[in-house]
Amino acid sequence: MTGFGKSVLKTSTLHIVAEVRCLNSRSLDMNLRLSRTLYDLEPEIRARLASSLVRGKVDAGISLQFLNPEAEGVLNHDLLRRYVQMFREMCTEEHLSEQDILGAALQVPGLWKDPEIYLGEEEKSSVFQALEEALQDVHRFREKEGQKMAQVLLDLIEEIEQGRKAVLQLAGDRRSEIHQRLLEALASGDLKKAVDENRLEQEIIFYLEKLDIHEELVRLEAHIQHFLHTLHHETMCGRKLNFIAQEIGREINTAGAKAAHAGIQKHVTGMKDALEKIKELLLNVL
């Protein structure tokens, strides 16, 4: 599920900014951007992100600004002078303008010396606090998205249930119609005299049982109720809902294959369409 969270925390020695962005993904894919001072904390930061977010394409960053002037970087003046002299000589040789040589030299890596700064336990605690606050923002974002998604799932599963009820009504009428049509066809052909009536009735019953879809509709109803119960009462249920959706699809497909009835096929098509939308949504559910 998607989400975004940001936290800005200021202490007596640090200004901390933590940001976490999360996009949909079937697994946990983490990209972490940290200030150099936080490299030692990277394993624990990754562990906290993985524990909280579970899966998704996660882009997280924590930046520090030291409020102590002694913690600022120091410019290497000697190295800067050498680069400026080299640039001037190159400009003379190549007949180039010397405009903004200083600006170009300042872009060379390694001119700034970072001081050796180590975070104390209080500073580390502040860093993790900022991270937790950013994660709480992500979860609030996800919760709002999840509520909207849950309502869409409820509407779609209700659409399948209405289709099931319509098919159930048509299936009862269809069984009687087929039975009557078979008897009339046999009578019109005067075939009853040539066959055993008991055997004929058995064959008709067997044929009707093959076309019967009531068992599929009963199982479909059970799967729908299971889906609703899981959606309302369980957390981290995305994969389970996906498995239940597969069972729902199996019963819908079987009923459609056995029905051989235009009216039933129409409702089966509608249920399949709603189910495909459910499956697409479930790809984004934890």
Image: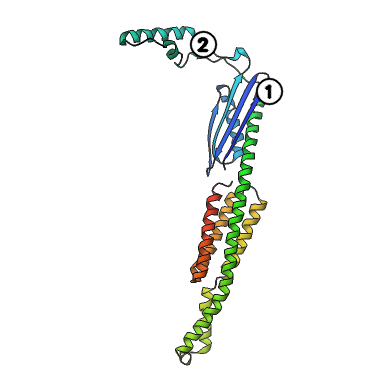
Residue drawn at (41%, 9%) of the image: 84
Between the C-alphas of marks 2 and 1, the distance is: 29 Å
Up the image or down, 248 lies above or below 140; here it is below
Secondary element at tag 1 = helix
Q: Which of marks 2 and 1 is in front?
A: 2
Q: Is residue 104 left or right of residue 141?
A: left
Q: Which of 100 and 18 is in front in this view?
A: 100
Tell me if 221 is positioned left or right of 184 in this view: right
Q: Residue at x 67, y 21 (%)?
A: 11
Residue found at x 49% / y 70%: 262
For the rendered model, the colour scheme is rainbow
Secondary structure state at the residue bearing disc 2: strand
Residue 75, numbered circle: 2
The residue identified by callout 1 is 122
Q: Quadrant of residue 214?
A: bottom right
Q: Given the image, on which type of amino acid does mark 1 rest?
A: Glu
- Tell me the quarter of the picture where residue 123 sits: top right
- Which callout, 2 or 1, points at the residue further toward the start of the chain? 2
Q: How many marks?
A: 2
Q: What is the x, y in percent for residue 240?
A: 59, 52
CB atoms at circles 2 and 1 under 8 Å apart? no
Q: Which mark is residue 22?
A: none
Q: Residue 148: image x %, image y %?
A: 61, 47
Q: Is residue 229 above or below residue 116?
A: below
